[in-house]
Image (spheres, rainbow, N blue to C red):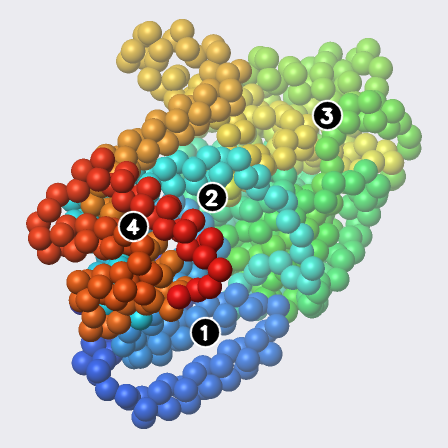
Amino acid sequence: MPLRLWTLAAVLVSVLAVTAQEEFADLRVLVPALIATGYLFSYWRRGRRNWWVKIVLALLCLEVAREFVRDVLVDPLQTTVPLTVFLLWLQVLHSFDVPARRDLLFSLLSSVILMAVVAVFALDERYLAYLAAYLLAAVPALGQNAWDATRASVAQATSAGPTGTVQPAVRSNREVWPAATGTLGAVFVVAGVIFALLPRFEGMHLTALPFSPRMEWLTSYGGRIMNPAYPNTRDDGDEVPRWNPRGYFGFSPSVDLRARGRLDDRIVMRVRTTRAFNWRGLIFDRYTGWGWRASEPEVIEVRTGFPPARLVYRGDELLSYGARPVEVVQTFFLEAEQPNVVFAAALAERLWTSAGHVYLDRYGAIRLPGPLQPGSVYSVVSRAMVPDPARLRAAEGVTPAFITRRYLQLPALPARVFALARRLTDGQPTQYDRVMAVNRYLWQHYAYDLTIPPQRRPGDAVDYFLFEERRGYCEQFASAMVVLLRAAGIPARLVTGYTPGTLNPVTGLLEVRNSDAHAWVEVYFPRIGWVEFEPTPGFPDTAALGDAAVPRWIWQGLGTRLAAGLDALGARWSWLGALRASAAAVGPGLLWVLVAVVGALGGALAWRTTMRATPARPRDGLVQLYDDLCTLLARRRLARGRSETLAEYRARVAAAVGAPEATRLLAMVEMAAYGGASVDDAALAAARRDLERLRRWLRRRRRWV
């Protein structure tokens, strides 16, 4: 019963961990209830043949297999969900037929597989809670099984089996568990070291990348931008939108620079990617004096298929293919409702989504038939650009007329804006140097501030930011850079999306929060296309983003995280300030030192507890010598019979072999087992010498007994 209960607990934890995932929510109650019922039924029927139960279970297994094959044939690109459902139902059916220990161990093995499946679907640290609960049930189940198996073997041996061998006596729980605890601690230390040393491989995709197989898409928007946080946003500038902290106003048909507020920090998506880039959403080309909007909102409908065809761009993205050699594979897991916008590293090349069609605007942005819902998944393969200053400096040539007409547009602006643009760019040798002159000026002379008040006077928003407020949001910085570049004759446009997010070192996913919504700048370079620039101080440069792949090793960035932690604690404990400067440099080395120290302590603890819990006892040595003697004699056709006592066996061996060493050893075992005689180290050494002499004597004999 204890083994059955521990196994049931481990199985239920694994099933609850699986059904906690959104894909299996409809099985969250049914499957655990059926498994518990099955274990009760198996215990009730454990002593019977149950032939009819096996027939029913076999038929149900065939039905479950048929459902699995049908689901795979319906959607051959999404096999993980039907395979997991198949495993869950097999666990349910098996729970009705677990009469013996081997059946319980099979259930335990199946639960290990289910926990591995959960690790595939899990996106955050909640998996660690399920894993801890599973270990609290599975480890006692394994210990109980070992305990029961040892007792069963001893009981079988004491009934004098055909070989006449016996096993050592069963040790008490007080002796067993310290050794098991030390060994388990050593296993955890080794597992932690392996986890730290294993790299996160970029992987490969053969036929498909993950996407939601069941998504309800609304088709009434016709490619129009739909932002659930601002459903009624107008793009005429007559009214400032009312601030919504749960959504970014930049994912709407227009961006109003007069809006004020702070976004909350809830996680909106998690991203698995090979490289960290800004996740581009929308592009705006027309500056209105109060904000931004797209001058041509028309879109073209693009049918999606499997595998998805390459997206063909026209319009303003036509010349953006040449300098994008970096392939970026991304999968987005949505945690909160988002606009009908595909966020991805620019330039998206292939899109895996369950939508039958998407919409492509002339700026290269992709829109879905409806808003993204929590639980949605889509994948993108992009061709990204890592800006190279040398190549950008050499990018001189004629800019196409359709680019200059659209991206040099400006409304009537105060003369001081044009004067500032000329002062910053005059004398710079190349277009790249002129762009960087404006970029550096904004970094050095303006402050990023989310507490600015509303604009206190009417007039142009960029002019007000540059010459009066001198602090603002990312939208003010990006708008100021675009306007200054256009005033200097350089085509530029405003982009909204998300910054890469924060890496979770446990899951390896980038966690993107609502407050990571951002605006930046794209500048057109002849023969290269659109290149990203970051004008807002405090945000990483786009070149640094492109160069940095997502850390492949868990210890990468440890120093940076340690430094951030010391910053937070430095205000309270001043002595931590001395560690702050060197934290980033010694991070990886410090990890190796910690791993070595913890590993040495864990190994020493395991060895010490094992040695303390399993001392070498003379009685155990005598049992082993008796076992060796019985094996040696059994090879000479002198095995102990089932009903033969030790005295009878000793007399038969003495008559057949005539070796005093055998009779002395058997007499010592008989006195220790039934006469209460103690065995010391000297007697054990003498018995070991007798056994060795007997083995040599039997080997020299020409004829076996």
Circle 1/circle 2 CB separation < 8 Å: no
State the residue position of label 1.
86
Q: Of all residues shown, which one is farthest toward the left?
A: 676
Q: Is residue 564 left or right of residue 510?
A: left
Q: Of helix, strand and loop, which one carries label 2? A: loop
Q: Residue 485: which disc? A: 3
Distance, label 1 to label 2, CA atoms, is 26 Å
Q: Residue 507: which disc? A: 2
Q: Is residue 588 visible?
A: yes
Callout in the foreground (1, 3): 1
Residue 178, located in which quarter of the rendered image? top left
The residue carrying pointer 2 sits among few (fewer than 14), some (14 to 19) or many (20 or more) residues within 10 Å by Cα, namely some
Q: Of helix, strand and loop, which one carries label 3? A: helix
Q: Is residue 141 visible?
A: no
Distance, label 4 to label 2, CA atoms, is 65 Å
Near-viewer residue (650 or 318) = 650
Q: Which quarter of the image is occupied by the C terminus?
A: bottom left
State the residue position of label 4.
661
User: What is the three-letter code of the residue carrying label 1?
Assistant: Phe
The residue carrying pointer 3 sits among few (fewer than 14), some (14 to 19) or many (20 or more) residues within 10 Å by Cα, namely many
Which residue is at a point 87% across and 39% down the rendered structure image?
400
Near-viewer residue (667 or 245) = 667
